[in-house]
């Protein structure tokens, strides 16, 4: 640990952790609205399978937002309710999944930096929380990147295979990662 970290009070260190947890929560709130907006659009375009996965990933992001909020409350902070960015609406098929892959790739990078802030400020619990969520965000990135690649390489052939598929996630969706058996 750096000497500055050692000389920082417990309250100062805790405040730094709460700050990154709230930044992460704001990113999750943005992802929720972004992915749900895309879910509705994909469903309207009759790409049910893609819409269903978009919804499940949004549910994962909701779970992440709540996990961050719970940790913030445990540390005595107040969880933000403001998303980190505005929702991009009316995206076309060529944009959605590349946009989302970039969003998830950035999230993994930023969360790794936030994990280091937690480590530097002696909060192993928040650090482990970031480790768990980074793994799930990486699964989201892989999904979005794969779909973007299929659309780029196969275009309408791939999209015609998906057209008309069911958007049902059945009952109460557990989320994409849990649905894939990864969590």
Image: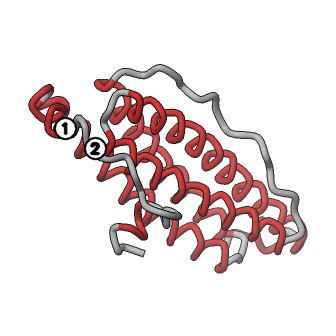
Secondary element under disc 2, as helix, strand or loop, is helix
Q: Position of residue 180 (x, y in %)?
A: 33, 68
State which quarter of the image contains the C terminus: bottom left
Q: Give the vertical position of 78 relative to 118 (above or below).
A: above
Between 19 and 54, the one lying in front of the other is 54
Residue 179 percent coordinates (x, y):
38, 67
Q: Residue at x 32, y 32 (%)?
A: 46
Q: Residue at x 30, y 53 (%)?
A: 142
Q: Is residue 74 above or below residue 165?
A: below
Q: CA distance from mark 2 to mark 1?
A: 6 Å
Residue 149 - label? 1
Image check: 59 left or right of 27? left
Rendering quarter of residue 32: top right
Q: Are marks 2 and 1 in contact (CB under 8 Å)?
A: yes
Q: Report whether 123 appears left or right of 144.
A: right
Q: Residues within 10 Å of mark 1 (few under 14, many from 20)?
A: some
Image coords of residue 108 (percent x, y): 46, 53
Q: Which quarter of the rendered picture does the N terminus lie within?
A: bottom right
- Position above or below: 93 against 97: above
Judging depth in this view, the residue of 96 and 167 nearest the camera is 167
108 w.r.t. 9: above or below: above
Q: Which residue is mark 2?
A: 145
Decide which of 50, 43 is in the foreground and name it: 43
Residue at figure coordinates x 79%, y 65% from the top left: 72
């Amino acid at each position: 640990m750096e000497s500055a970290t050692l000389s920082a009070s417990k309250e100062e260190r805790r405040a730094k952790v709460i700050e990154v947890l709230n930044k992460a929560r704001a990113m999750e709130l943005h992802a929720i609205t972004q992915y749900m907006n895309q879910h509705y659009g994909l469903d309207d375009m009759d790409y049910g399978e893609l819409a269903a996965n978009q919804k499940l990933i949004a549910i994962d992001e909701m779970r992440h937002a709540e996990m961050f909020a719970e940790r913030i409350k445990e540390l005595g902070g107040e969880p933000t309710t403001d998303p980190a960015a505005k929702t991009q609406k009316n995206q076309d098929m060529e944009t959605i999944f590349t946009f989302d892959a970039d969003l998830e790739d950035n999230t993994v990078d930023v969360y790794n930096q936030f994990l280091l802030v937690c480590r530097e400020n002696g909060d192993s619990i928040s650090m482990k929380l970031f480790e768990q969520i980074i793994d799930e965000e990486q699964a989201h990135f892989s999904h979005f990147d794969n779909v973007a690649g299929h659309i780029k390489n196969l275009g309408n052939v791939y999209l015609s295979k998906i057209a008309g598929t069911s958007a049902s996630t059945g009952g109460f969706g557990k989320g994409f990662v849990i649905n894939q058996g990864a969590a």
